[in-house]
Image: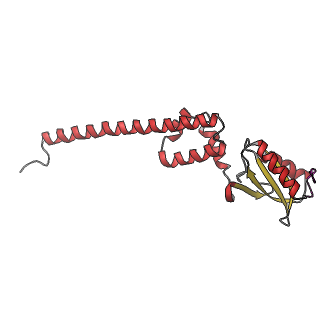
């Protein structure tokens, strides 16, 4: 009876496995190089302001799903913002339609709110769901806490992302001209 595999077949199979391992290592290296090129390009766009915190958070999520294990190592090597900071931004992704945020007052510790550094225009609502105040900020949670102490009766809020602080000022002024809101000090601007 002939053995299942003879020594020559074992050696040939081992040789083929070695060739496959070399090809796998080459593919992994090319895979990582492609990700590094993509992330380097994104880092440049972040540095010039073409990508903001929420864009980075969305990219982080896409990479996490596509790359698999070990993605934070390559992220931290290539990006100017570490994965820990981006995880915070990720927790701040909009929870409303068309990239808006909304919530109750006061927001819970884990409720999504606009992250610091993102310009927004926000509208505060009374218990009757009527808008009573409009404002703009880049530090929403802090500003909302201030309003909660200063303006009793606020129950809900909605925040709209703006492309810049100047765009937020313009939208805020437009809304103030269009709506006479009882708690705004700038009524009738």
Residue at position x 59%, y 39% from top? Answer: 83
Asked which quadrant contains residue 20, the reply is top left
Q: Residue 119's x, y, as percent? A: 75, 45
Residue 138 at least partly seen = no
Would you say the magenta stretch is mainly helix, strand or loop?
A: loop
Pinpoint residue 107: horizontal percent, then vertical percent: 77, 54
Residue at position x 66%, y 42% in the image? 52
Residue 68: within the magenta?
no
In the displayed structure, 152 sits above or below 37; it is: below
Indicate the quadrant where residue 42 lies.
top right
Residue 164 appears in view: yes
Q: What are the residue bounds of the magenta stretch?
A: 181-189
Rendering coords of residue 44 (x, y %): 59, 34
Q: Residue at x 5, y 51 (%)?
A: 1
Q: Is residue 183 magenta?
A: yes
Considering depth in this image, is 48 or 71 the residue closer to the camera? 48
At horizontal 63% and vertical 37% (from top left) the residue drawn is 46
């Amino acid at each position: 009876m002939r053995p299942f595999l003879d020594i020559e077949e074992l050696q040939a199979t081992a040789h083929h496995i070695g060739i496959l391992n070399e090809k796998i290592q080459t593919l992994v290296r090319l895979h990582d190089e492609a990700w590094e090129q993509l992330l380097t390009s994104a880092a440049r766009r972040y540095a010039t302001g073409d990508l903001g915190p929420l864009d980075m958070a969305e990219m982080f999520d896409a990479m996490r799903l596509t790359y698999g294990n070990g993605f934070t190592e390559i992220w931290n090597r290539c990006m100017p913002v570490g994965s820990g900071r981006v995880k915070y931004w990720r927790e701040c992704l909009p929870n409303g339609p068309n990239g808006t945020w909304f919530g109750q007052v006061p927001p819970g510790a884990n409720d999504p709110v606009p992250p610091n550094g993102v310009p927004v225009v926000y509208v505060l609502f009374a218990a009757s769901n009527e808008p009573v105040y409009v404002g703009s900020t880049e530090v929403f949670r802090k500003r909302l806490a201030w309003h909660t102490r200063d303006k009793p009766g606020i129950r809900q809020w909605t925040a709209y992302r703006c492309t810049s602080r100047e765009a937020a000022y313009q939208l805020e002024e437009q809304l103030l001209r269009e709506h006479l809101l009882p708690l705004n000090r700038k009524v009738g601007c």
